[in-house]
């Protein structure tokens, strides 16, 4: 798991007007592989404390199970924060397989899952994602543009003040 501010800004700005700063990004997996339940618990706690400070938090994780998605929803509810859940799918099975089998890795020692690993993973269908992004027929750039447009449409209102 890694945590970073996307563009830190000045400390003075963050204390006087946190909504002007970019979000905190919490990334699961990657360098550390499967973070397990303890890693998710740490992520929830970090997200909660930063939301209470008035920051925007982006948690980037696979979330194949309802229990992890429900936990993120609880964090949002406990901090009176809005939540936008994004499910990224590839509806074309052949394209999905091609992507899995042709990925390259730029992190030493990181082992990518095989297509069989992907098929064997536990996955529980989403009951209420805010945004479903199907990338089957889009480039990365096109998918990012579509996601940005859909997110801005959902969050085009002033941020909530921090919880005391």
Image (cartoon, grey):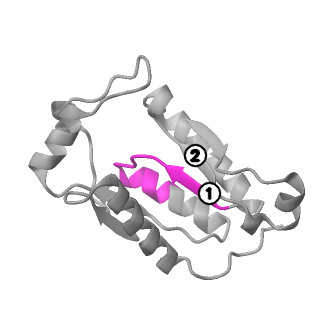
Q: Position of residue 145 (x, y in %)?
A: 40, 65
Query: Viewed as shown, does residue 63 lie left or right of 19?
Result: left
Residue 69 position by quadrant: bottom left
Q: Residue at x 53, y 68 (%)?
A: 83
Q: Earlier in the sequence, mark 1 or mark 2?
A: 2
The N terminus - image quarter: top right
Magenta highlight range: 56-71
- 72 w.r.t. 82: above or below: above
Q: Nearer the viewer, residue 59 or 106?
A: 106
Residue 97 position by quadrant: top left
Q: Which mark is residue 57?
A: 1
Please identify the residue farthest to the bottom as the structure is shown. Answer: 157
Q: How many residues crowd mark 1 within 10 Å: few (<14), some (14–19), many (20+)?
A: many
* Element type where label 1 sits in the image: strand
Residue 149 highlighted magenta (yes or no): no
Disc 1 + disc 2, Cβ < 8 Å: yes
Q: Position of residue 70 (x, y in %)?
A: 46, 59
Mark 2 highlights which residue?
26
Residue 90 position by quadrant: bottom left
Q: Position of residue 25 (x, y in %)?
A: 59, 49
Counting every numbered tag in the picture gives 2
Query: Viewed as shown, does residue 156 lie left or right of 160?
Result: left
């Amino acid at each position: 798991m890694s945590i970073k501010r996307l563009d830190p800004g000045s400390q003075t700005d963050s204390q006087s007007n946190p909504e002007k700063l970019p979000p905190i990004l919490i990334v699961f997996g990657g360098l550390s592989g499967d973070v397990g339940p303890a890693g998710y618990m740490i992520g929830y706690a970090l997200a909660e404390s930063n939301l209470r400070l008035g920051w925007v938090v982006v948690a980037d994780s696979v979330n194949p199970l309802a229990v992890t998605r429900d936990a993120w929803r609880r964090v949002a509810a406990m901090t009176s924060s809005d939540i936008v859940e994004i499910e990224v799918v590839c509806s074309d099975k052949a394209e999905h397989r091609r992507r899995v089998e042709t990925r390259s890795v730029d992190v030493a020692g990181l082992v990518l899952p095989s297509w069989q690993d992907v098929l064997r993973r536990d996955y529980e269908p989403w009951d209420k994602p805010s945004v479903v992004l199907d990338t089957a027929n889009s480039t990365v750039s096109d998918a990012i543009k579509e996601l940005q447009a859909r997110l801005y449409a959902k969050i085009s209102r002033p941020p909530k003040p921090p919880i005391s």
